[in-house]
Every structure is written in C-alpha cells, then in structure tokens.
Image (spheres, helix red, strand yellow):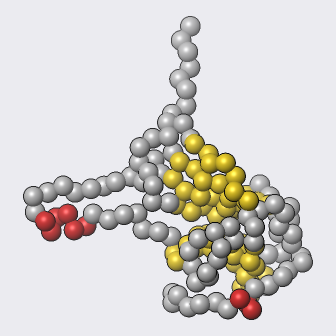
Amino acid sequence: MSCKSIEPSKFQSDDSFQIEGPYYEAWTAGVRGGGSGINVFLPLKDLNGITPDSIHFRGQRVKAVYDHQHIVGRFQTPHNQPQDVIMSHKPLAEANNQLLPIEDPSPFELDENSCVLSYIRQQKRYYSKIKNLKKRRAVPHPAAPPSPSKP
C-alpha cells in the first residue's frame, strides 16, 4: 500500500450518523512489559448503513471495531512493551533488537485531539474528520486480580 496524502477536501460531513462525545484514554498494564496504549472511542448509537474501516490518530492508523455502540480504535504506545533483547558478546547478534513497530502510518496531519474515521458505504470509502476529542483519565490496570481470601 502506498502512503499518499489525502486531501482535506475528501472529508465527508455525513448526517446519516452522529458521533456524540468522542474521547480517548490512555492505559498501562500493571505488570512490567504488559503493554500500554491509547484507545479512541467514537460513541455512535446506530451505524445507519456504514461499515467502520479504520481510525487515524496521532500519525497512526488502526482497524476500527464497532462494539457496544462505540467505534473503537486501539493504538499501542512504546511504553511498557515486552522486550525481547538479545545480549551477546557478538555485536551483530544484537542488531535485531528493535522497538515495537507502530501500526500503519496515517497520511493525515492532525491535531493531538483530532482523528479521522474511514468508513465504507455502498462499497465506497469515505473519510470523516472528528475534532475536539476529550481526554479521559488514564486507566491503570492492576498486575493481577486480587486472590480470594482463605477461610
């Protein structure tokens, strides 16, 4: 897939669906190497004939999923990711040590709190720019569920 720029004139203002109160929230796993990311939520009561395809946010593009009246995009961040590091006395053996690859790059240049929803309607792709996503408090996940107390 080529990474070509998409002109802002390609954005649709589609009245057939209404996204109300879009937001994003960061999360971090409670264990070292358990991962971290940002989830983008686009509340939508009814899809009205569209099929969500992807969400573009902060230079990345991920698959969009419709779940519980929300279109959701789950973006990984490089913090707290599992590290598979090779330590060796041979310099070339360590050459394969890499950071986690980011998701597909996005062709859009967006503000920190904006995203683009790519969707399909009647076998044609459309793009909708969503501005002013609200930042919600980060979600820390516990290391493990609490163990039941013994009688």
Q: Quadrant of the C terminus?
A: top right
Residue 141 vs 123, above or below: the answer is above
* Front in this rendered view, residue 21 or 146: 21
Q: Is residue 45 left or right of residue 87?
A: right
* Front in this rendered view, residue 110 or 145: 110
- Outermost residue on the left side: it is 89
Rendered image quadrant of residue 4: bottom right
Evaluate whether residue 127 shows in this view: yes
- Outermost residue on the top side: it is 151
What residue is at 64 percent from the left and 64 percent from the top? 73
Residue 150 vs 141, above or below: the answer is above
Residue 56 vs 10, above or below: the answer is above
* Front in this rendered view, residue 74 or 111: 111
What residue is at 85 percent from the left and 80 percent from the top? 14
Evaluate whether residue 55 shows in this view: no
Q: Position of residue 70 (x, y in %)?
A: 76, 60
What residue is at 51 percent from the left and 75 percent from the top? 104
What residue is at 64 percent from the left and 77 percent from the top? 110
Q: Is residue 47 left or right of residue 75?
A: right
Q: Position of residue 41 (x, y in %)?
A: 71, 60
- Outermost residue on the front side: it is 111
Rendered image quadrant of residue 68: bottom right
Numbered label tally:
0
Q: Position of residue 84 (x, y in %)?
A: 30, 55
Q: Position of residue 132 (x, y in %)?
A: 75, 67
